[in-house]
Amino acid sequence: MNELLSQTDLADYLKLFQGDKTLGEKMISQDIDGVWFTGSRETGKVISQDLLPKNIIPNLELGGSNPAIIFNDADIDGIIDKIYFERFFNNGQYCDAIKRVIIHEDKIDEFVEKMLFCIGKKKIGDPNDNFSELGPLINDIFFKKICEQYKDAINNGAIEHKNNTDYSNPLFFQPTLLSNVNEQMKVWNEEVFGPILPIITFKSDDEAVRLANSVKFDLGANIFTNDKNTALNIASKLNAGTIEINNTNHWNPSIPFGGLKYSGNSKEYGNIGFQEFCFSKVVCIPK
């Protein structure tokens, strides 16, 4: 990659390094003006503490546990592909994914049936196969973590819904929907970095908002309803940096991206994101 960069004007401004914790510690110990970090909340906390003596506040984009609120007027057929992609893309291993479904009680049976059908059409296999859409998790650490979250949910009353597959890989976790979930379960109040989708039902709008705001990861959110006024009212009450209504998409270089609380403290992209990487200077001169 650095060889490719050398052929562009970016070579004077950007260098790429690969490494582990040791490299990261070495980089932030240098004479630097700022740090932009994307990763886990735990690592973000360490970086913030290490930068305190330099009086540097890092730009942090950390984890997410995005809720998807599905109202009883939503067209499940029209939104199922988007929800599948937002949850199971890259096996659910990215921060800005739908990680919790909050659905009106009248819609849960239809949603579970159609999501399982959607998953069942996907090719599960070796990630080196260009046709594979679902495969193993990235490493043993993430696999053990998601198994722990899954077992906690099942042991505390969650009901699993999944298709059977004969794909064999030591790091493969079957894409799973969990109903009868409660707010004490790890799959609800922790970030789930893998192909599990916990589902909670609601009756009232206020209950849906409370459930959506019940965790500390406030990166993004999704609202699915045919009522524009309902969507905008609910959006105004959600704790989230970006909110998508129905089949919209916020991924555009001009749109600021970032979350609140455990999900970070800054924005990327757009004019707001550009300002995060600037120092303001005021010069006063006589008239």
Image: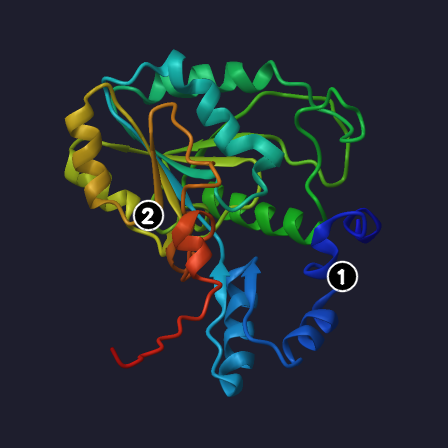
CB atoms of marks 2 and 1 within 8 Å: no
Is the C terminus in the top left, top right, bottom left or bottom right quadrant?
bottom left
Say which element carries label 2. loop
Horizontal and vertical percent for residue 208? 23, 38
Identify the residue shown where x is 34% and y is 24%: 246
Q: Which residue is mark 2?
A: 240
Position of residue 50 relative to residue 127, above or below, is below
- Res. 17 mark: 1
Q: Nearer the viewer, residue 33 or 29?
A: 33
Q: Amino acid at mark 2?
A: Ala
Picture quadrant where residue 75 is located: top left
Q: Earlier in the sequence, mark 2 or mark 1?
A: 1
Mark pair 2, 1: CA separation: 32 Å
Q: Residue furthest bottom?
A: 53
Q: Amino acid at mark 1?
A: Phe
Horizontal and vertical percent for residue 109? 35, 18
Identify the residue shown where x is 79% and y is 49%: 1
